[in-house]
Amino acid sequence: FWLLWATTIAYVGLLLLSPPDWLPGEPIWAIQSDTIQEILNESLNFFFILPLLNLLGISYVQAPMVNPATQGFFNLAEAWIFMFLPLMLMDRRSQQLPRTLLWGLAMFLTNVFLMPYMALRLGQPMENQLNKTNKGTLSRLFGSLGLTVGNLAVIWFCLNRPDLGGVLSRFDYLGRQIVSNRVTLAFTVDMALFWVFQAWLMGAIIPTGERVRPLRFIP
């Protein structure tokens, strides 16, 4: 419980507030207009809706031009946190918490809200969850859409705008962004934490002995 709160404070303090000589890029209190525009452009291309509409000839709003490596990376992270909602709703231990609200906020600020949710969850009484929890329509809908966007993010990362080079050059660009751009660094940390929290929540939902239980470790 306290470790999660300490990790939340460290996450906010280091990734959002620490000065540039601690981590690459700007803290939120000194964010530059170029960084704000980068975040805005990636957000406008959320789930590739605008780019795909433009490809279909619907161009009332033109999708901003964003490097496919960072755009694919951003949407992969968003698809992952998107799929957390049914997982959170199936968890009986957190049923007294405002799960939908916390998930909605996490869609915008990821682990600024997801980590506190995990900490608050530990403060709730343990619920008997011996019976298998069946997936409902919401789970299947979110899972299918999240999987579709996640796969599209990988394809977008690898193949969109071939003039920018092959897959290795895109990984090279992403690597340079991680060590120089705090936004990309934050999404890297986010996805590592998503992996931990996914395994944690699925472990609480899937009974011991179920054949699918080991799948919780697959991102």
Image (cartoon, rainbow, N blue to C red):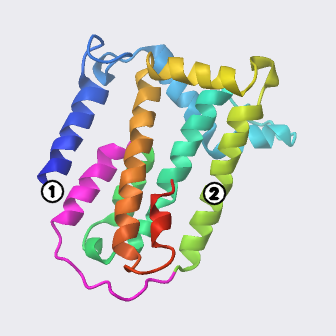
Which residue shows up at 39% across the image and 60% down it? 199
Q: Tell me if residue 79 comes above or below residue 137 in the rendering.
A: above
Q: Position of residue 111 (x, y in %)?
A: 34, 45
Q: Nearer the viewer, residue 211 or 38?
A: 211
**Residue 119 image offset from top left, x and y in percent:** 21, 57
88 w.r.t. 78: above or below: below
78 or 32: nearer the viewer: 78
| Residue carrying label 1 | 1
- Amino acid type, callout 2: Leu
Query: Which residue is tagged 2?
Result: 147
For the record, the magenta segment spans 109-134
Quadrant of the image occupied by residue 67? top right
Kind of residue at badge 1: Phe
Q: State which tag comes first along the sequence, 1 or 2.
A: 1
Query: Of 33 and 158, which appears nearest the observer?
Result: 158
> What is the residue that sits farthest to the top in this orientation?
21
- Distance from label 1 to label 2 (Cα)? 31 Å
Q: Secondary structure at mark 1?
A: loop
